[in-house]
Image (cartoon, rainbow, N blue to C red):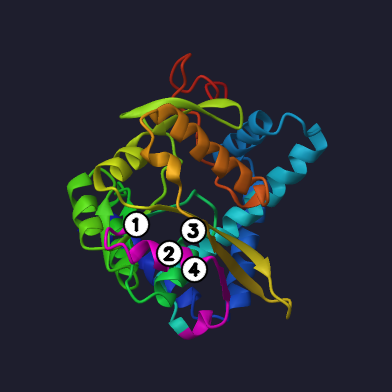
Amino acid sequence: MNFQKIKTDFLIGLARLFVKLPLAVVLKGGGTLGFLTWIIPNKRKKIAARNIELCFPEMSATEQKVLLKKNLVSTGIGFAEMMVAFWSKKEKLANRFEFSGLENLHKALSGNKGCLLLGCHLHPIEITIRGINDAIEKKGHMLARQHNNKVFEKHIDKARRSHCEKTIDKKDIKSVLKSLKGNNPVYYIPDQNFSYQCEYIDFFKQPAATVIGPVRLAQVSKTPVIPWFGFREKNAEGKTCWKIHFHKPLDYFQDKDIQASLTKMNQLFEQQIRTHPEQYLWVHRRFKNHPKGKNYLYKDL
């Protein structure tokens, strides 16, 4: 008997039942879960606190503490948003997405070279990707990291493929190039810590191991790179909605100076994160790999 499979299947079943509740209740439940991570000591809270301390030195200790609390609550809401994205019916999300700059995506695809949809790990990432795929004719393909729990990964991959035409392992560059050649948009979210094929590029003035893949893919495929960002906000009726903006293509990804391109990419991410800093994935050890040694900035947590 595979206990891990039984446990995982049971938890997935509970999640699928949970998202049948009204959307406001589901999101409130996520916020409550996030609040519990604020009041109960845990490692992720310590990691988020350290990241906020490093990245917002201009804030007072009180301001950093307020941001930490907001971030952990938002992390819980993001977890609920993920479940909604995976297992809710389309009707539950009707009229909850507001788009701007969508013409930039359509124009990029008109060149028949696909496009890289470049984003960062904001809490609403899964639900905004679903919102985009539900709104466009040619569904995006999604680069994703394989989860260590293979049973869980099977559930998640199936859920993503219900609105993404295809999911691609983040190391499978051949499949990415094939998707771009087929004129598909490919979601690429490269702002996590990397230990291979990366450069140390400043992110909030901290050296961050930054993958060079987006630049190399853009140069090899000659595909447009469209940055996009989706944040959780309130609409005119006071209901939760997600506002998604597509920028114009980044021309600097074709430059030979890879470090300069990655620097501009990280600066763009930082600029966007600063508009809603509570909605970024600060619980991730973004600076795990460090010029002074692995886990240098987190070793005392």
Q: Position of residue 46 (x, y in %)?
A: 61, 35
Q: Tag 1 or tag 2, which sits nearer the N-term?
A: 2
Q: Are marks 2 and 1 in contact (CB under 8 Å)?
A: yes
Q: Is residue 71 above or below residue 152?
A: above
| Side of 26 relative to 141 (left or right) | right
Q: Nearer the viewer, residue 213 or 281?
A: 213
The three-letter amino acid code for the residue at tag 4 is: Leu
Residue on which disc 3 sits: 125
Q: Position of residue 73 (x, y in %)?
A: 65, 55
Residue on which disc 4 sits: 102
Disc ID at residue 189 = none
The three-letter amino acid code for the residue at tag 1 is: Cys
The three-letter amino acid code for the residue at tag 3 is: Ile
Are there few (<14), some (14-19), or many (20+) residues within 10 Å of tag 2?
A: many
Instruction: Report the span colored magenta.
Output: 91-114
The mark closer to the camera, 3 or 2, is: 2
Q: Position of residue 254 (x, y in %)?
A: 36, 39
For the residues marked 4 and 3, what is the alpha-carbon distance in whole angstroms? 17 Å
Residue on which disc 2 sits: 105
Quick one: quadrant of the C terminus? Answer: top right
| Side of 169 relative to 44 (left or right) | left
Disc ID at residue 115 = 1
